Amino acid sequence: VQLQASGGGLVQAGGSLRLSCAASGRTFSSGATGWFRQARGKEREFVAAIRWNGGRFYYADSVKGRFTLSRDNAKNTVYLQMNSLKPEDTAVYYCAAGSGVILSQVTNPNAYSVWGQGTQVTVSS
């Protein structure tokens, strides 16, 4: 499977963006699909994920209430709607997938085996 992330850009604080993660080669059907971000000089951190077994969504505390995951099974695409963006949300955002990701691993980037190329999100103050 290959992942294609898109939708990043420059937005003012308080604005919104929607990121897309489209999969090709295989459908999302097991494990988890997640979004991670990496700001300059910082480690990659968990943002949000969906576990396909049960369809539950998981969010980092820093984005709860502002970011929302959704999926379009027909397009094999996962979306990350980002509202009320803050300057501290500025980062390169990556989507990732792992067919063997279990509940305890959802927030661990090392559990994901396939990564998209990343898309830059810049929030100006």
Image (tube, rainbow, N blue to C red):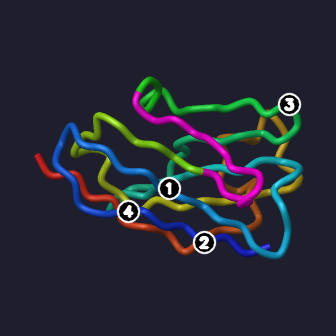
Q: Which mark is residue 36?
A: none
SS at badge 2: strand
Describe residue 77's horizontal placement relative to residue 11 as left or right: right
SS at badge 3: loop
Q: Which mark is residue 8?
A: 4
Sequence-first disc among 4 and 3? 4
Q: CA distance from mark 3 to mark 2?
A: 24 Å
Q: Position of residue 6 (x, y in %)?
A: 48, 67
User: What residue is pinned by disc 2?
Assistant: 4
Q: CA distance from mark 2 to mark 4?
A: 12 Å
Looking at the picture, which amino acid does disc 1 mark? Arg
* Mark in front: 3 vs 1: 3
* Mark in front: 1 vs 2: 2
SS at badge 1: loop
Q: Is residue 74 above or below residue 101?
A: below
Assess whether residue 112 is covered by the magenta stretch: no
Sequence-first disc among 1 and 2? 2
Looking at the picture, which amino acid does disc 2 mark? Gln
> Which residue range is magenta in the image?
66-78
Describe residue 61's horizontal placement relative to residue 50 as left or right: left
Sequence-first disc among 3 and 1? 1
Q: CA distance from mark 3 to mark 1?
A: 26 Å
